[in-house]
Image (tube, helix red, strand yellow):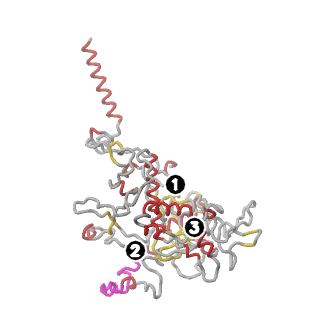
Amino acid sequence: MKNRLNLYLIFLGLVLATAASCSKERSTTTGWSYNDTENGGFEKTPYLEQETGPGLVLIEGGRFTMGKTEQDIFYSWDNVEKTVTVSSFYMDETEVRNIDYREYLYWLKRVFGADYPEVYKKALPDTLGWRSRLAFNEPYVEYYLRHPAYNDYPVVNVSWLQATDYAAWRTDRVNEIILIREGLFEHNPNQFNEDNFNTKAYMNGQYESGKRVDGLIDLDPNKETRNVRMEDGILLPDYRLPTEAEWEYAALGLIGNSYGELIVERKFYPWNGHGVRNASDKYLGQMLANFKRGRGDNMGVAGQLNDNAEITAPVYSYWPNDYGLYNMAGNVSEWVMDVYRPMTAQDADDFRPFRGNVFKTLVRDEEGYIAEKDSLGRLKYREVNPEDDNLNERRNYKRADVINYKDGDQGSSKYYEQPGEFEALGDASMYDFGNTTLISDRARVYKGGSWNDRAYWMTPGTRRFLAESQSNPYIGFRCAMIRVGSPTGLSD
């Protein structure tokens, strides 16, 4: 009887062990189980859905006709129609507000102000941009950015470079609070100089301050804990400016005008119809956006202000488009990522079109380890080059900076058979910058109309440009983020 009991216990143990091993998901190519320390600990993390970052809404991608929807009154032919496909992405529901940007300035001053005051000064909007030689705009210089009355108004006088820096900062703050929420980090209001949370530095093992615990349990049998990795799907992708194609696609909001695979009504503006007033009985005649109706008419007549805003308006003013985005026409024009070229529509890919790529990689030492962080706590990057990165063996690109590809490079210049002449002329080989044009590799596109523009500029296909280091009181911005995985998520 005792022997039979022992045999039963042995059999039961084998059954339980077999069941336990069968309960682990196995690789369909090798048969080895995932998440098993006995097999080396290769992990497959359960993943359901990308978390929607603060302030963002999902823009379901698709094809659309990019370019002008109104006649080209300037005959510039820089926005000819082209069918393109935009992947799903996330975009800010509203423009970035004054209160949002002041939060950024406060953080910079608190962390870097003592030893690196230039970081804070570099981020300050140029409030003097409000000044005009023959207008009394001085109150805006002093009050618009700082006064609480303008908290929910869009930040302006911010350059493209400043907007890009803000988006990078926002990425780190959002990911930091995610790690705090997950119990991995402590609240640390005393970050100082280079000792501040940076997403890429943390994921590459270059930031250890502020940890509440050593990290996640590591299934590698030779380790105990580890940092969060990209494979975990916990941290969000980077906030950034939208591409021109993304912004234009989101502004049109064609999701509300599609039936099956047909777009049944063309749009001039982010709303239906060819007018700028609301056609519904309840709001008949009310303006659908904040713009300049005519010469000297910024707001209408007292008692019946046509758009209730002499300059900008609060970011939740007017009606959102079919994606739920506010003020994609009027209020402020908005920066996008693209470098301006008149021929972008003809040259760019028809899938996720964009001009402005400069390919970079992390700086590493001779042994291949990531170099130390810079004085602000950020990892160092360099442009890829043929010698160190084997570009000669690549087929899809041969150099880091491809801003000029097909438009401004040697192949598109009349000096294409005279390399020496082309190199000697530099940017002026194609565009005579400063003499006959303001187009250069530092000219960035901004989209949409503003409070100071006529209705023509509110059509999403219009495009203008300004040097990336310049700003004015008519241009603001909003951030975007890639959508990873399925275009629609759990709904499909």
Binning the other alpha carbons within 10 Å of mark 1 as few (below 14), some (14 to 19) or many (20 upward) gives few
Left or right? Give the position of 333 relative to 424. right
Magenta residue span:
406-425
Going 47% across and 77% down the picture, which residue do you hit? 467
Q: CA distance from mark 3 to mark 1?
A: 22 Å
- Residue type highlighted by circle 2: Ile
Sooner in the amino-acid sequence: mark 2 or mark 3: 3
Q: Which residue is mark 2?
A: 403
Q: Is residue 421 magenta?
A: yes
Q: CA distance from mark 2 to mark 1?
A: 31 Å
Q: Say what secondary structure mark 2 lies in.
A: loop
In percent of width and height, residue 251 lies at 57, 65
Is residue 363 positioned above or below 176 on the image?
below
> From the viewer's perspective, is the residue at label 2 or at label 3 nearer?
3
Q: Is residue 276 magenta?
A: no
- Residue type highlighted by circle 1: Pro
* Depth order, front residue of 279/330: 330
Disc marking residue 54: 1
Quadrant of the image occupied by residue 375: bottom left
Left or right? Give the position of 271 relative to 364. right
Q: Which residue is mark 3?
A: 145
Left or right? Give the position of 118 relative to 6. right
